[in-house]
Image: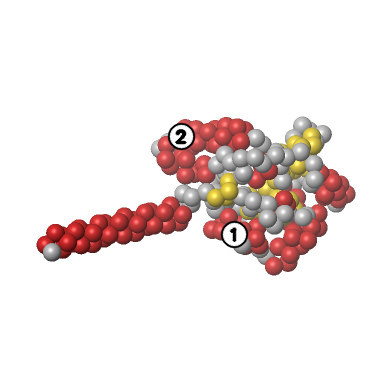
Amino acid sequence: MRNRRKRAAGGKRKGKRLLLMAVIILLAAGMMAFKGGISRTADESLGWNLMLVNSRYRIPDDYSVELIRLSNGEQVDSRIYPDLQEMFDDARGAGYSLFVRAGYRSEEDQENLMEDKIEAYRQEGYSQREAEREAEKWVAKPGTSEHELGLAVDINAEGQTDGNRLYQWLADHSWKYGFILRYPAEKEEITGIDYEPWHFRYVGKQAAKEMYEQDLCLEEYVQ
């Protein structure tokens, strides 16, 4: 009888330890998710044009893209090229000179860009961790950049065109061609990226129209 009682007490203590360990693991997992430490794999369940990629959704390892090269050497997903060309033609017709400063990037390109940005902050006197935090405000971690999808373009003004006026025209009209201003100033807490008036993402004309009319960023629209 005494041995059975000892075994029962030992079993209860073991059960409590297991329960405590499970609680600790769940709390740790929750904290990682809260800090953006968990990165799930993005998918195309809503369509290739609405794949959400950010600090919490990585590009699938088997993702592939058929690229088309622009006149200045930059590349984009071939599926967005006709709408991109139409947007550029109409912008030029409205009196703006513009070009794609950055289109598709490989994961290696993104990694090099991140390292360069971190080093630039290090040169300004930031510690390594501080430099990484600052760099991540402007550069997506490799594997989480929309540029790696071929669906995002950074657009710059050229010649005598005023950049601010160009960005305003694009913000007002890009939805007509299936593009959205991906990182608006008022959505920084949601996107996790500081305001980038030059960064436009293709989502398709219907989705872009709805996002523009309802003032939604991509995270809000798909989730």
Q: As drawn, is 200 to the left or to the right of 126?
A: right
What is the spatial separation of the Cα atoms under label 2 and label 1, in whole angstroms?
A: 28 Å
Q: Residue at x 74, y 47 (%)?
A: 162
Percent x, y of residue 198 = 68, 47
Instruction: Find residue 146 and report its image quarter.
Output: top right
The mark found on residue 122 in the picture is 2
Q: Which tag, 2 or 1, sits closer to the chain's start?
A: 2
Q: Residue furthest front?
A: 1
Q: Is 199 drawn above or below residue 1 in the view shown?
A: above
- Looking at the rendered image, the quarter that the C terminus falls into is bottom right
Percent x, y of residue 158 = 76, 40
Q: Secondary structure at mark 2?
A: helix
Q: Residue at x 73, y 52 (%)?
A: 49
**Which amino acid type is marked by label 2?**
Arg
Front residue of this view, candidates 9 and 82: 9
The mark found on residue 187 in the picture is 1
Percent x, y of residue 16 = 26, 60
Q: Residue at x 57, y 34 (%)?
A: 111
Q: Tell me, what colour scheme is on the image?
A: secondary structure
Percent x, y of residue 200 = 70, 49
Decide: few, some or many residues near mark 2? Use Cα within 10 Å; few <14, some 14-19, many ≥20. some
**Which amino acid type is marked by label 1?**
Lys
Q: Residue at x 77, y 32 (%)?
A: 73
Front residue of this view, candidates 12 and 98: 12
Front residue of this view, candidates 108 and 214: 108
Residue 158 visible in the shown view: no
Q: As drawn, is 180 to the left or to the right of 220?
A: right
Is label 2 or label 1 in front? 1
